Every structure is written in structure tokens, then in C-alpha cells.
Amino acid sequence: MDRIGLIAGNGKLPEMFIEQCIRQGIEPVSVYLFDSVEESVKKHVNSAKYSIAQPGKIISYFKKNNISRLVMLGKVEKDLIFSNLKFDFTATKILFSARNKKDKNILKAIIDYIEGEGITVLPQNYLFDEYMVKNENYTKNSPSKNEEKTIEIGIEAARMLTDIDAGQTVVVKDESVVALEGIEGTDKAILRGGELAGKNCIVVKTARRKQDYRIDIPTIGLETVKKVVEINGRGIIAEAEKMLFIDQKEVIEFANKNKIFIKGIKIND
């Protein structure tokens, strides 16, 4: 049986990946990074826990299990980079090789190390084609013509935000940018936008122009939509063909019930 390694952070994506592997007759071998990962990931056969600061032990585990390909999936909170982790010798070498402490550059250095050890790192959308955002309106509600200019401004702002690697989400209203995502993440940026501008905000999320899908893939799901409802927002714009839309049936039903829109838009650079 074919085997694929999984480095699992928080959230549903690692659990979904294991399910997809099983459906396709692939045996996943998992390393999970936190006690807070989904229980099904922790309890799955061939699953072991190592700290994010122990890449040497993680690679040894995969080699022992004859893994030549792996995927890195799930949330690793950005503020972990600045916490007092006890790095092993391998982690220290990796951090030294990174250009700076931007999470993207650290993850790129980790990937370079892994591939230097003979293990290919696959893109995070591997096996997830059915979950990619499509160029369509998913909900009963849709943006009004008056909101099109606001959405254009949101897309432009989100693109600029990704270009400086600060975040991928912006909150806009009435042709103005209200909030930009920083180290706090998407959900908190949405709540901040609601606090600043009140109801009827629109959330816009895009991928980087040259997204390295081995490092990260933008995702929308139920928690994101709940935050939009919490601020009495109008809806979400997501870049089509460049990000994942998980729990689609449940999310669309929730959005329709709360009269917000979810729309995928293909962006041509």
C-alpha cells in the first residue's frame, strides 16, 4: 500500500486528509504537533506526537516508516514563532538558514531541509480538488451592484497585503478598507472590522500572487462564516481556484439561514 506522511497542526484539514487517504487506499503516517489537534488524528494508527521545535525527530520518524512524500496541514499559530520553544539542533540550523523570522521563510527553510533529506513535500491541496473554491456565488444572497466597487477595493487591498506577507484577509465597507489581517489571524481581523465599522462589512480573502501551496493554502469554513454573522456582515469574497472551502454544505446552509453571501471570484493578475 502507498504511504504518505502528514505533519498535522490544528483544525479540520489534517482529519480530512486522513479520510481522503483512506478513501483512496493510501496509508497515512502522521506526526501531530499539539495536544489540541483533532482526536481522530491523535488516535489514528501510525500517529506520533513531536514538538514543532523537534524537526530532527520528526524526520527520523518518517524515515523509520519509509515515507518519501508528506503533506504539512493545519494551523500553527504565528505567535509560536516568537515563543520560548526549546529547539533541537536541527531546528536551530533551520532557523539560522531562514532569511528572517517571517513564518513563510521559516516554513520554506523547514521544507528545504525536509527535501534535502530525500522526502518530497506535497502541496496542501493534494487530494483536495473537490474542496477548491469555484468561480461562482454559493448562496441565495449575492453582492449588490453598489457593492462591486467596495469588493474591487477589497481585492486590491488584500493583494497588497499578501505582497508584503502580512496576511490574506481584509474587511471593507462603503468603498473603504476597515481592517487588515496581521499576526492575529483572519477571525480576529473580522471581529476588529466589525468593531470599527459596524454592520454590513464585507470580508475579502485572497491567496498570494505566487502562493507556495506546500507552505500554506488559504481556507474558508464554518468558523470564518460565523465571525461574519457575529459582526452582522454582508458576506465573504474568496479567491476562486486558489483556496479551500471546507464543510461546504453546512456552511452554505448556515449562510443562507443568516442571509449573508459567499462568493468565489477568479482574479486575473
Image (tube, grey):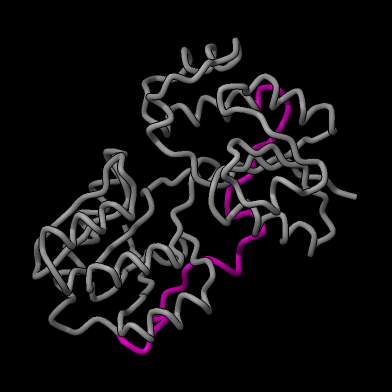
Quadrant where the image shows the C terminus: bottom left
Magenta highlight: main SS: loop
Figure quadrant of residue 69 = top right
Report x, y in % for residue 188. Answer: 29, 52
In this view, the residue in front, 34 or 120, is 34
- Residue 8, placed above or below residue 189: above
In this view, the residue in front, 196 or 17, is 196
Residue visible at 73% across and 27% down in the picture: 118
Residue visible at 51% across and 40% down in the picture: 215
In this view, the residue in front, 69 or 91, is 91
- Residue 45, placed above or below residue 84: below
Left or right: 181 with respect to 29?
left
Residue visible at 32% across and 50% down in the picture: 168
Report x, y in % for residue 116. Answer: 66, 22
The number of numbered discs placed on residues in the rendered structure image is 0
Residue 139 in magenta? yes
Residue visible at 52% across and 66% down in the picture: 246
Report x, y in % for residue 75. Answer: 50, 45
Report x, y in % for residue 83. Answer: 41, 24
Q: What are the residue bounds of the magenta stretch?
A: 115-141
Residue extending furthest right? 1
Residue 160 in magenta? no
- Residue 115, placed above or below residue 91: below
